[in-house]
Amino acid sequence: MNQKSAKSFWRQLKERKVIRVGAVYIIVGWLLMQVGEVTFESLSLPPWALTLLIVGVLMGFPIALVLAWAYEITPDGIRKDSAGLATSPAEDIPALDKSAPSIAVLPFADMSEHGDQGYFCEGISEEILNALCKIANLRVASRVTAFRFGSKGADVAEIGRRLKVQTVLEGSVRKSGDKLRITAQLVKTADGYHLWSRQYDRGLEDIFEIQEEIASSIASTLSVTLKRASSALQQQVDPKAYDFFLRGLSYFARQSLQETIYARQMFDRALEIDPEYGRAWAGLAYTYGFEFLYFSASDVNREEALRTSHKALELAPDLAESHVSAGIAHCMVQDYPSADIEFSKALELDDQNYDAWYFFARSKVHEGDLKKAIHLFENAARVRPEDCQSVLLQSQLYHSLGDEKHELAVSREGLERARAVLELNPDDNRALNMGAFALLRLGERQEAMEWMAASVKKAPMDTVVHYNAACLYALAGNVEKALDCLENCQLKVGSLNREWLQHDSDLDSIRDHPRFADLLATFPT
C-alpha cells in the first residue's frame, strides 16, 4: 500500500468511527475482565467461566470493528454505512484559484404548483451556463458536476469547496401556463453574501430575453465580458417548441438508451411545432449518433444521423452543435476528412465546446492517428477540468505508442478525477467503469476488478460497459472472460465498432485468438 492509499485508508477508519469503536471496546472489554476476575470466584462459578469471558471479549473485537466499518448509528437507528465500494474520501482540496472569477450554476428549483417543471428549470439553468461558458476569463463548473448539488441542499460554502468556485448562481421557477416567475441570485461561496438578485415576471415568449439578462447581469457583476452572438436566433423559436426542446435536453443528459429515445421523442415534438428549429434538429442528430456509438450501431441510426445533422447544418450553420452532430455522423460512415472539417468548424465557433474536442479525438482514434487524438483529448480535459474520461482514454493511446511514463502519469491524473467524480456521485458508472483501467495500470488489480464488477452489475445492458470490461480482462490476462464480454456486446447487448476494435491496444493480448477472428468476421467488409 503506497503512502496515499495508506492515508486514505486511515482517514476512512476515522470517518467510519472504527478507531473510536475499537478504543471503546478495548476499555469496556478490559473492565469486564477485571470485574469477572473479582466476582466470578465469589459467585462460585467454575474456573473455565473466566477463560470463556476472555475468549469472548477477544473474539468480539474484530467483529466490532467490521460492524463499525459497515454500519453507522444515526438518529433513525442503525443503518448501512453510506460510503460506497468505489468512493474514496476527498483528499485535502487545493486552495481556491482566485486568479480569475469562477461560478457554478445550479439547477433552478421548481416552484410550480404541480412540481412537474423540473426539466424546464434544468433547461433554463443549462442555457445560462452555456452562455457563461462563452466568457473567456470566467471559469464555469460543468453541468455534470454542478447539477449534482441541485437536490442535495448543500450550502454554498460546501459547493464552493467541492467545485472550487467563488460564486454560485441559484434560483427558482414558477411556471403556470404561459406565465413565468423566475428568481435568480448570485452568491459568494466564501461568506454567503448576495452579489446580485432579481425576480422576473414575464410570459413564456420572453424566456430568451430573461436568460440573456441573467447572463449579462452576472457578467457585469463579475466584471467580465459576455459574447452575444447567438441569442437572436433563439428569439425566433416558438416558445412551445422550445419547451419540448428543454424536455429533450433533460432526458438526453441522463445518458441511457431509454432516456435517449425519450429525448428523441421530445425533439420530434418540438419539430412538429417548429420544423425550422435548427437546435432541435441538432439534438435529434445527437440522439441517433449517441445510440449508434454507445448502444446500437444499426444502419437506421447511421442514416438518420446523416439526415438530421444535414438538416441542422442547413438551418443552424452558426451553431457549434450542428457541426459536432455532423462530425459524429461522418465518423459513422468513416468519412474522416469531412468529420475533420465539421469538428474544426465547431471549434472555430465555440472553442469551449467539450463534445467537439472529445468526439474529434475519438474520430482520430478510429483513423489510427493516436498523437493527434491525445492532443484533442488534452483539450477536452482542459475545457472540462473535472472530466475523467478524456484523461483516462489517453492512457491506452500512450500505451500503444510505447510511452510508459505518460501512460502512468495520465492514469494517476484520471484516477484522481474519477475518485472526485464518485465522491460527488457514487452512481456515476462511467467513472467507475473507466477508473478500473487506471487502477489496473497502477498495480491496484483487486480494486480494479471490484470497480469493473460493480460497473457491469449496474449496467447489464450497456454496450460500452461490457466492451470496457472486455478490455480490462484482456489487459489482466483473462483471455476467455474478455472474449465472453466482447461476444456479449456484439450478440446480446448491442453492437461493436469495428474500427475501434482494430486500433484498441487494450485488446492486443486476444487479437490472435480464433474467437476474436470469428468476432471480426461478423462485421460486413
Image: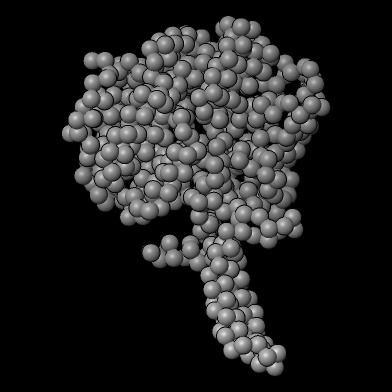
Task: Return the x and y of residue 222 as percentages of the image width and height.
Answer: 63, 41
Left or right relative to 180: residue 62 = left
Left or right relative to 508: residue 71 = right
Task: Return the x and y of residue 59 as percentages of the image width and height.
Answer: 54, 73
* Residue 13 visible: yes
Task: Return the x and y of residue 62 as percentages of the image width and height.
Answer: 53, 70
**The C terminus appears in which quarter of the rendering?**
top left
Which picture quadrant has residue 341?
Answer: top left
Residue occupying image coordinates x 25% and y 49%: 404
Residue occupying image coordinates x 66% and y 92%: 41
Task: Return the x and y of residue 266 as percentages of the image width and height.
Answer: 60, 16
Residue occupying image coordinates x 26% and y 40%: 479
* Residue 374 visible: no
Most extreme residue toward the left is 512
1 or 121: nearer the eye?
A: 1
Work out whether 108 lies above or below 69: above
**The N terminus appears in which quarter of the rendering?**
bottom left
Image label count: 0
84 or 168: nearer the eye?
A: 84
176 or 459: nearer the eye?
A: 459
Left or right relative to 9: residue 171 = right
Work out whether 500 lies above or below 188: above
Which picture quadrant has residue 45?
Answer: bottom right
